[in-house]
Image: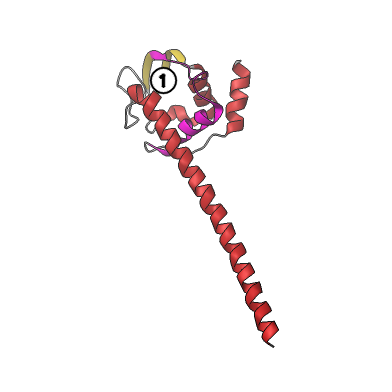
Amino acid sequence: MRKLIYLLILGAMFIISCGQEGNKNEANNSESDNNKEVKGKEIYNRICIACHQSNGEGTPGSFPPLAKSDFLKNKDSVIAQVLNGKKGEIKVNGMVYNNVMPPMGTALKDQEVVDVINYVYASFGNDGSKVTIDQVKHIRATVE
């Protein structure tokens, strides 16, 4: 009887420890996602904030808003613009802007492009959409 109780306790401990390991993996995934958001914000603050401002509202007449921006609906265009930059007119939320956005394709790695774009999608009242590294690699391959 004593052996049976001992085996039951060991079995329960094993099951509990497996469940805790799963929770650790979930926590690691959350930390990883949080880390990517932090990196995205750091990139935004280093590169994008000068034109698009800390609130994502841009500079009226000069630089378009990222906050609640209708331009963000087309993820491929967003990725291409981050990688290749933009010269000339662009219409965002009904307003025309005509300035230059420098290309970031050589300055940023694919994961950094993902992180900063996903930060923008998760901020400024945007819808929380996400882009993937595969999407960035695909767009980068079409322009090189």
> Can you see residue 7?
yes
Number of numbered discs overlaid on the protein picture? 1
Asked if residue 31 is among those painted magenta in the image, a careful observer would answer no
Identified at 54% across, 34% down, the residue is 131
**Residue 69 position by quadrant:** top left
* Near-viewer residue (60 or 18): 18
Identified at 32% across, 27% down, the residue is 53
* Near-viewer residue (29 or 139): 29
Q: Secondary structure at mark 1?
A: strand
Identified at 40% across, 34% down, the residue is 41
> Can you see residue 74?
no
Identified at 40% across, 29% down, the residue is 44
Left or right of 15? Residue 85 is left
Q: Position of residue 21 (x, y in %)?
A: 58, 59
Left or right of 109? Residue 123 is left
Residue placed farthest to the left in the image? 60
Residue placed farthest to the top in the image? 88
Residue span colored magenta: 99-123
Q: Please tell me whether residue 56 is drawn above or below residue 106 in the rendered image.
A: below
Q: Please tell me whether residue 11 is drawn above or below residue 59 in the rendered image.
A: below
Q: Position of residue 37 (x, y in %)?
A: 45, 39
Asked if residue 113 is among those painted magenta in the image, a careful observer would answer yes
Q: Position of residue 85 (x, y in %)?
A: 47, 17
Q: Amino acid at mark 1?
A: Lys
State the residue position of label 1: 91
